[in-house]
Amino acid sequence: MSSNAIIFIALSVVLSIISFFLDRKKTIAGFKKGWSMFKNVLFPFLSILIVVSILLYLIPPNLISQYLGRDSGVLGFSIAAIIGAIAMIPGFISYPIAAGLIQQGATYAVVATFMTTLMMVGVITLPLESKYFGMKVAVLRNALNFAAAIAIGLLVGLIL
């Protein structure tokens, strides 16, 4: 366990104890609400994490490195951007996926492109978005965010 994790856990415990002494009922209600939220998130989180872990295990690292690594060029960015734009993965699940991709040989620039399109572009949600904002606005927003995601990926590539 990292030192940051230990610090955050210790700080959480201390603040929880202080909260408990200040207002026992609110603290217990908060823990119950937190537990309820945790249970609601746990199954989807574990399901996606298991599927992604199996995929990362089945796909050889050299294949990930070939298509998303340093020499992948435009193809790597394109694959990352398209998959990120289409996938519907919650943000908190995407971080372990990103770490796994980097460990398997993907570059930071490609992973940044994937993560940014994942958060900012919604191909699957486009029909719903266009229902509320109109097709022109929805498509424009997604297109601009797609371009911004690629620019962010390229910027990350230049920095790292």
Image (spheres, rainbow, N blue to C red):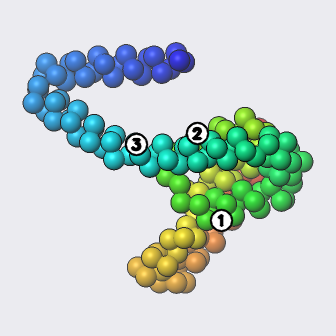
* Residue 145 left/right relative to 110: left
Query: Is tag 1's residue or tag 2's residue first in the polypeptide sequence?
Result: 2
What amino acid is labelled 3 in the image? Answer: Leu
Q: Residue at x 49, y 79 (%)?
A: 127
Q: Residue at image x 35%, y 19%?
A: 11
For the C terminus, the image quarter is: top right
The quarter of the picture where residue 104 lies is top right
Q: Position of residue 107 (x, y in %)?
A: 77, 43
User: Residue under circle 3?
Assistant: 42
Tell me, for residue 146, which label it has, or none: 1
Q: Amino acid at mark 2?
A: Pro
Instruction: Name which residue type carries label 1.
Output: Phe
Q: Nearer the viewer, residue 56 or 30?
A: 56
Front residue of this view, candidates 99 and 132: 99
Provide the residue designation for mark 2.
Answer: 96
Other residues around mark 1 within 10 Å, as few (<14) / some (14–19) / many (≥20): many
Residue 114 location (% of width, % of height): 66, 53
Which mark is first along the chain, 3 or 2? 3
Q: What secondary structure is marked by label 1? A: helix
- Residue 133 in sight here: no
Residue 39 is tagged as none
Mark 3 element type: helix
